[in-house]
């Protein structure tokens, strides 16, 4: 029944650990690679004889306690046998560790109750291709063609608390045989009621690792005797190949894992944070806490059903969500940091624009002030030049006569003889007006003449130049012969020459009013170019 030692061919390696050649673990992994699982008949053919062997082994004096997992089970045509020499070492393969009963995972060798748990876990993996633990699904969810009674048997075998788990391996072998009677020889007769209660205790399936059945779904009891029926009715196809999500998109993997975890609504998870227990939480509540960053990968997570406790990052299912939550937290922090940088840059840009606008305004204001100052200075210079260049001919007469002149050429203080002055018709030039003007008077009774400033004040105001659009770079010379308060002759010269502007300025001067005096006076005003 038991081999002294397994042969030691070269083992193979999977992502979960090393797989001994010729072991049941190797047979399971080969099926997994192919996307296949064991049929119900093939699985029963393995676990029923195994139960009988383990039942006898636990009765053997000195060898009654040991571990059971697929890597130390020799699998072949002769059946599945235990490598007893290796049955006292904890497994290294991850899926083998899931088979070990919760009370034995710290190294304590298992009794018959631990073997009941191991057989149930092996059967679950054979027909579903998955391991037991957080997020496990009921077999019917994976393969609806499995007999409903398998969930009843597994629910009892996979009770996490050994005090409420059955210990009768013979009764378990009998119940498993009924799942597929054609799969194995009938085991020795046993009382299957021991799977429900024995020796003053009842099996509590509410403590089973198997998730509870959905509400409203009937649970079929184990039948002690089943008619095998025709071979066609006994044959059950294998479950559909399980999808490989190892290379799937993280979102798809998270969604699939979340769906598995939510299948078990029991509050079974406790998180140790800052030395205090938080919970228990259901899987959904725990995922929400992880997503809100209340719990991180470094916090301890304890499964109250199995009693297993380790860091959250060491639980294969929950570490996916912890890692995703960590990434989301980093993304949010990076986004906040980026927003701060963008805001700071925006503020700096706004200040730069404001400073630039301010400087531009100051430059424009300074330029405008400079232009106004230069313009006023230019106008003042023009006025000054006009006043300096103005010349009022105040001679006593334009006829060339010198009678009535005072010594030095000035007019006589007395009134002119006769008191009459020739009147020149307007409209000519300054020079023609002077030629027409002939004054015959005596030295007596000559009235005093007007001052040069009286006439200069009229022509020196260059506002009338603006009406004609005289540019600042143009010099203008105006000669006006004035008699009786009006210009009777005007000559305008521009540099550079511009007949249009000269005509316009001449018209402006002809329209002006001057101080009135019967004698003719000649006024010359020059506006220099800027």
Image (cartoon, rainbow, N blue to C red):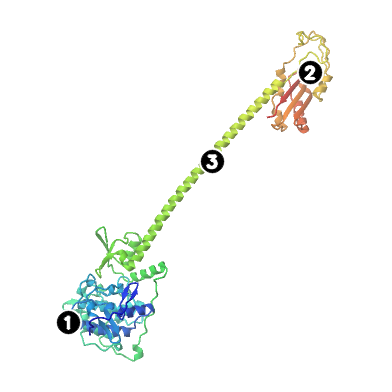
CA–CA distance in space, label 3 to label 2: 60 Å
Q: Which mark is residue 357?
A: 3
Q: Nearer the viewer, residue 459 or 295?
A: 295
Q: Quadrant of residue 213?
A: bottom left
Q: Which mark is residue 222?
A: none
Q: Are marks 3 and 2 in contact (CB under 8 Å)?
A: no
In the rendered image, residue 374, in percent from the top left (x then y), is placed at 62, 30
Please report whichever mark, 3 or 2, sits nearer to the chain's N-terminal start: 3
In the rendered image, residue 220, in percent from the top left (x then y), is placed at 29, 81
Tell whether 305 sits left or right of 144.
Answer: left
Tell whether 431 sits left or right of 357.
Answer: right
Can you say which quadrant of the picture contains the C terminus? top right
Q: Quadrant of residue 148?
A: bottom left
In the rendered image, residue 526, in percent from the top left (x then y), is placed at 72, 25
Residue highlighted by disc 2: 520
Residue appearing at x 68%, y 25% in the figure: 382
CA–CA distance in space, label 1 to label 2: 158 Å
User: How many badges with numbers are in the image?
Assistant: 3
Q: Nearer the viewer, residue 182 or 99?
A: 99
Residue highlighted by disc 1: 60
Q: Label 3 neighbourhood size at 10 Å, few (<14), some (14-19), many (20+)?
A: few
In the rendered image, residue 156, in percent from the top left (x then y), is placed at 25, 77
Residue appearing at x 58%, y 36% in the figure: 364
């Amino acid at each position: 029944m038991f081999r002294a030692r397994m042969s030691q061919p070269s083992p193979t390696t999977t992502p979960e650990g090393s797989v001994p050649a010729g072991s049941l673990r190797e047979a399971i992994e080969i099926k997994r690679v192919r996307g296949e699982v064991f049929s119900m008949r093939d699985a029963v053919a393995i676990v029923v004889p195994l139960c009988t062997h383990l039942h006898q082994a636990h009765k053997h004096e000195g060898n009654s306690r040991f571990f059971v997992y697929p890597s130390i089970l020799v699998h072949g045509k002769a059946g599945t046998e235990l490598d007893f020499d290796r049955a006292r070492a904890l497994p290294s393969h991850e899926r083998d560790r899931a088979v070990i009963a919760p009370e034995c995972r710290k190294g304590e060798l298992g009794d018959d109750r631990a073997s009941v748990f191991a057989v149930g876990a092996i059967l679950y993996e054979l027909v579903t291709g998955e391991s037991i633990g957080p997020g496990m699904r009921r077999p019917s969810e994976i393969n609806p063609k499995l007999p409903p009674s398998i969930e009843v048997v597994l629910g009892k075998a996979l009770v996490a608390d050994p005090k409420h788990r059955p210990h009768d391996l013979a009764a378990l072998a009998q119940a498993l045989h009924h799942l597929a009677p054609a799969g194995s020889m009938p085991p020795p007769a046993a009382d299957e009621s021991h799977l429900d209660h024995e020796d003053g205790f009842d099996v509590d399936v509410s403590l089973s690792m198997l998730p509870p059945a959905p509400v409203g779904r009937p649970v079929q009891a184990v039948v002690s005797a089943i008619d095998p029926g025709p071979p066609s009715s006994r044959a059950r196809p294998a479950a559909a190949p399980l999808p490989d999500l190892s290379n799937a998109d993280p979102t798809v993997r998270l969604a699939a894992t979340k769906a598995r975890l939510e299948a078990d609504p029991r509050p079974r998870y406790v998180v140790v944070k800052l030395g205090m227990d938080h919970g228990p939480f259901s899987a959904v509540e725990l995922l929400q806490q992880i997503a809100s960053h209340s719990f991180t990968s470094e916090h301890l997570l304890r499964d109250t059903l199995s009693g297993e406790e380790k860091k959250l990052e060491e639980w294969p299912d929950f570490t996916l969500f912890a890692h995703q939550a960590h990434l989301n937290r980093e993304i949010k922090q990076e986004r906040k940091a980026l927003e701060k940088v963008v805001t700071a840059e925006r503020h700096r840009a706004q200040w730069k624009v404001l400073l630039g606008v301010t400087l531009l305004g100051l430059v424009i204001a300074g330029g405008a002030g400079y232009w106004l100052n230069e313009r006023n200075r230019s106008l003042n210079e023009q006025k000054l030049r006009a006043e300096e260049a103005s010349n009022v001919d105040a001679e006593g007469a334009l006829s060339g006569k010198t009678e009535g002149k005072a010594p030095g050429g000035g007019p006589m203080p007395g009134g002119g003889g006769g008191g009459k002055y020739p009147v020149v018709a307007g409209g000519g030039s300054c020079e023609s007006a002077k030629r027409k003007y002939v004054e015959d008077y005596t030295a007596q009774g000559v009235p005093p003449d007007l001052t040069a400033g009286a006439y200069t004040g009229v022509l020196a105001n260059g506002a009338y130049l603006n009406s004609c659009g005289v540019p600042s770079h143009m010099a203008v010379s105006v000669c006006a012969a004035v008699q009786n308060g009006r210009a009777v002759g005007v000559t305008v010269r521009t540099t550079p020459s511009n007949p249009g502007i000269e005509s316009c300025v001449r018209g402006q001067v002809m329209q002006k009013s001057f101080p009135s005096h019967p004698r003719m006076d000649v006024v010359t005003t020059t506006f220099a170019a800027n």
